[in-house]
Amino acid sequence: MGPRDSSAGQYQGDSVKSAIEANSAGPTEKSSWTVTILAGLANYIDAGSIVASSVALALWAELYHLSPSFVGVIGAFSANAISAGVGALIGGRLCDKFGRKKIYQYDMLFYAFGMAWLVCANQPWMIVVGSVIVGLAVGADIPASWSLIAEMAPDGARGKHSGVAQILWNLGPIVVLALSLLLSPFGLLGMRIVFAHLAILALALTLLRSRMQESQLWLDAKVRNEEVPGGAAVSWRELLQPRHIKSMAFLIGMYGLWNLWAGTSGFFFPYILRTVGALSQATSVMVQSVGCVVGMASIFFVFMRLADRVDQRLLFGISALIQIGGMALLALFPLTVPVAVAYLSLMAFGGGFGAQSFFQLWSAELFPTLIRSTAQGVTFAVVRIGLGVWSFFVPILTATGFHMLAWILVGFLIASGLVGWIWAPRPEARYFDGR
């Protein structure tokens, strides 16, 4: 076959064989947890970036006199939305083509540069550029990390390992919010220090990840594909098979509609609390921290303990009902501190075993190994780019009437819940038999 006869193809084949020999001992329970934590720190980085920018957003708006439209531009092109989607689209394909390790080992350097840029940003255009760089790096890391976690986890424990990554997703905001609260007297300087901590963490993570092994499932699948007469690299066009199109449509519908709420709340809620609720920066930070702690407890005590053992459709449905009720509080009542705390607590508890956690798990299980990251990148890209388009309108809707926005978000959660409840994948519809 042509590619295998070429020197480039031979070199790639030798690289795969060398990696298989390095992995020959196989992952131990300890090493699989190490991989989960190091890969899952992508979630810490992702959420930390979003929350750090969201806390800084109100300060930027005041300091640079930003219009609601420009605030929407920052949100749309941030790590919360479009740039992350583009990064996931590119990174996901590269992960399936060259391996997970090459992507997750080096994209954090790109992330660190973006964060350093935000540390130095002193003009509105610099904020947009830094946000785009950070978003591209975060997006590229997500499919690599989520695929690796699922592929390295023992059979019957993928939900538990995915849950660790989601706990780290909540830990990022807690650390960022705590630092923001501690440094709030210093204003924008305090936020620069928060950005700097994320840049330093990214550099440290690059060093730690350099010792990690490649995914054995990906290596085995790559070798099997090359051994097929006439075999070649698996094309992204494999995703056009009806089965895979249906899986992507389901994931985009379930997670994409939910993420319109999550992205709005995660990025704009501090801005909303200060502009609509008239709360101080310190009070806003403390209110959000409560929600993150509740979310971590929900993931640990509910999702990690039950996702691998009970009916996942039922678990998802209960989560959706809790979150619909929580969002309805903001639609029905004035935005006060007690209402904000109740809202965040309900949303965080329901979210711990809801759409975000199941999207990470199902997006890995519904696709074969050699297109797994590509599929995750495509679905994540559509979701985040859709959120980016929506983000243009959030500040404008907030300015014209917060309760109208709240009811729209209730509608998104209802639609997401119905999609997840009706079309949740059956166990026999999933992969992970080594394919």
Image (spheres, helix red, strand yellow):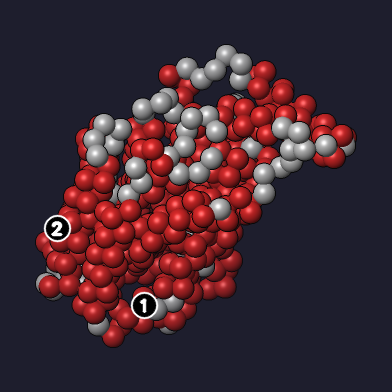
Quarter-of-image position of residue 293: top left
Vertical relation: 126 (above or below) 165: below
**Sequence-earlier tag: 1 or 2:** 2
Amino acid marked by disc 1? Pro
| Badge 2 element | helix
- Residue appearing at x 72%, y 32% in the figure: 228
Residue 431 in view in this figure = yes
Work out whether residue 210 can be spotted: no
| Residue 36 rendering spot, x and y as whole percentages | 45, 32
The 10 Å Cα crowd at callout 2, few under 14, some 14 to 19, many 20 or more, is some
Residue 435 found in image quarter = top right
Q: Is residue 63 above or below residue 22?
A: below
Residue at horizontal 28 percent and vertical 55 percent from the top: 422
**Residue 125 drawn at (x, y percent):** 57, 73
Measured Cα–Cα span from mark 1 to mark 2: 23 Å
Residue at image coords 87%, 37%: 6
The residue that appears at 49% across and 51% down in the rendered structure is 243
Q: Is residue 204 left or right of residue 408?
A: right
**Which residue type does callout 2 highlight?**
Ala
Whether residue 364 is situated above or below residue 26 in the rendered picture: below
Is 254 placed above or below 392 here? above
- The label shown at residue 395 is 1
Q: Write down the residue under mark 2.
A: 342
State which quarter of the image contains the N terminus: top right
Residue 180 versus residue 165: which sits nearer the camera? 165
Q: Position of residue 302 (x, y in %)?
A: 22, 38
In the visual, does 177 lie left or right of 341?
right
Image location of residue 67, percent across then percent down: 43, 82
